[in-house]
Amino acid sequence: MNPIRLYMSMSLDGYIAGPDDRPGQELGRGGGRLFNWLDDRKSDGPSGQVFREAMATGAVISGRRTFELAGRRQGDHHSGVPVFVLTHQVDDGDTPPGHTRFVTDVEDCARQARAAADERPVMVHGAGAAQALLRSGQVDEMEIHLIPVLLGDGRRLFDHLGSEHIELDLVRRLEDRDVTHLRYRVRRPEEVA
């Protein structure tokens, strides 16, 4: 089964955006620092490898807030793969652009994205979508691009997960300039002793 994989750049203190993230300042104050590693995305090194893997995903699940802050991605996300926007509600007349679909049910969103990805991994973007998918047991792997900075405030990745422990297995660690790429496999409840 193709994995649903969270891809996220994160500060050491757990933020994926700085404070005051909004249209025109989508990454918040200081949040752009989390993406300096992308300067090496065309390299043959670890960051280039990770970037190429991310671009080879077959579908994207995005949270509604992330989707809107990204200008609705003009209906596209890397080479026209389907984008499934996980949202609490869909307003009448709100037609998603391009290859985008709005989905209100977490499990249904995961099922549709897996089917559309055609055996390739599914990329997850956005804290809200990541939290909902983790709570429902739909995330298989996490690719965290850990940045050596403390933002001190902003939008946290792992808020609102509930009181249940989520156990992870580190399956890959790649070091590069200004980033450590960490891939974790999410253990299923039956695997946790």
Image: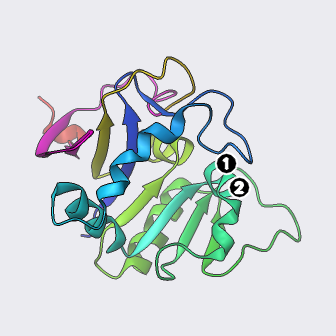
Which residue is rendered at x = 68% and y = 42% of the image? 25
Task: Report if the CB atoms under discs 2 and 1 are less than 8 Å apart.
Answer: yes
User: 54 and 119: which one is in front?
Assistant: 54
Task: Residue at 47% x, 82% y: name it.
Answer: 79
Q: Is residue 44 left or right of residue 71?
A: left
| Numbered marks: total | 2
Q: Position of residue 181 (x, y in %)?
A: 22, 45
Instruction: Bin the neighbour count of mark 1 within 10 Å (Cα to Cα): few under 14, some 14-19, many 20 and up.
Output: some
Q: Which residue is mark 2?
A: 68
Q: Position of residue 78 (x, y in %)?
A: 47, 75
- The type of residue carrying mark 1 is Arg
**Residue 170: quarter of image:** top left
The quarter in which the C terminus is drawn is: top left
Secondary structure beneath dot 2 equals helix
Q: Can residue 134 be seen at all in this image of the molecule? A: no
Q: Nearer the viewer, residue 119 or 68?
A: 68
Residue 88 in magenta stretch: no
Q: Residue at x 70, y 50 (%)?
A: 88
Q: Is residue 30 above or below residue 66?
A: above
Query: Separation of disc 2 and disc 1 at Cα?
Result: 5 Å
Identified by mark 2, the residue type is Glu
Is residue 20 something one can see in this rendering?
A: yes
Instruction: Point out the stretch of residues depicted in magenta.
Output: 157-186
Residue 173 in picture, x, y percent from top left:
13, 44
Q: Secondary structure at mark 1?
A: helix
Would residue 66 be found to the left or right of residue 117 on screen?
Answer: right
Which residue is disc 1 drawn over? Answer: 65
Q: Residue furthest top?
A: 152
From this view, report whether residue 58 is shown above or below residue 109.
Answer: below
Q: Is residue 160 magenta?
A: yes
